[in-house]
Image: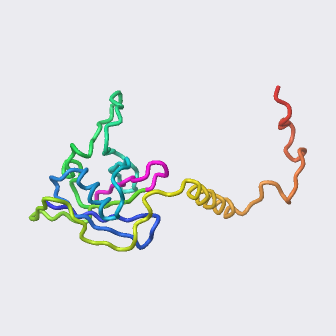
Amino acid sequence: MVYRFKLVSDEVSNFAREIEIDSENTFLQLRNAVLDSVNYNKDELDSFYLCDNDWQKQEEITLEDMGDSSSDIDTWLMDDTTVGELIEEEGQRMIFVYDYLTERSFFMELKEILPTRHLSEPVCTFKKGNAPKQSVDLDEFDKKVDLKAQEKFDDLDFDVFPGDEYNEEDLGEGFDIMDMN
């Protein structure tokens, strides 16, 4: 049986991909199909996360075992886990984290199950738009995050201290920053 997944990005509004994969193929094959569809190199660590309907991460499918065997949580490895083992119904959601440092991801949803078809290898059947860059300059990323945070703060529409100036008396007693006793 063949699964058709749709991928989108929260960074690029006109980006989309569709990947078809046999349910007997592994998550490693799905990973490689995703990375090939966006022309990303395959030498970075990444993971799939099964999600609920609100995109909250649940089970992780990792590229490599990180050695946390003390955990009560099952470890799913991409190379050892078939897609059909964890994905069973249309509408199932996943997040594919391709950049751990900045948590950049693709959002994936199983759009259709084709029970009478079979594929030996996954294939990208639809491409729209350009994918976001695989990695970003961390300084530039931090500036964007800081700018977004400042915009949200500015949207709150209040002043921490009225006017441009304040004096220590405005803070009240008990806030003497020089008194460290």
Q: Is residue 44 left or right of residue 178?
A: left
Q: Vertical placement of 100 versus 92: above or below? A: above
To which quarter of the image does residue 94 belong? bottom left
Q: Is residue 156 left or right of residue 78?
A: right
Q: Vertical placement of 148 versus 60: above or below? A: below
Q: How many marks?
A: 0
Main secondary structure along the magenta-highlighted residues = strand
| Front-most of residues 132 and 51 | 132
**Quarter of the image with the C terminus in it:** top right
Q: Is residue 112 left or right of residue 39?
A: left
Horizontal and vertical percent position of residue 131: 40, 66
Q: Is residue 154 left or right of residue 98?
A: right
Type of colouring: rainbow
**Quarter of the image with the N terminus in it:** bottom left
Q: Residue at x 90, y 44 (%)?
A: 169
Horizontal and vertical percent position of residue 21: 20, 60
Q: Residue 95: say if magenta.
A: yes
Horizontal and vertical percent position of residue 151: 65, 63
- Tell which residue pokes out farthest to the top in this image: 181
- Tell which residue pokes out farthest to the left in this image: 116
| Front-most of residues 14 and 63 | 63
Q: Residue at x 31, y 72 (%)?
A: 127
Q: Residue at x 40, y 51 (%)?
A: 56
Q: Which residues are magenta?
A: 92-104
Horizontal and vertical percent position of residue 133: 44, 62
To which quarter of the image does residue 178 belong? top right
Q: Residue at x 11, y 64 (%)?
A: 117
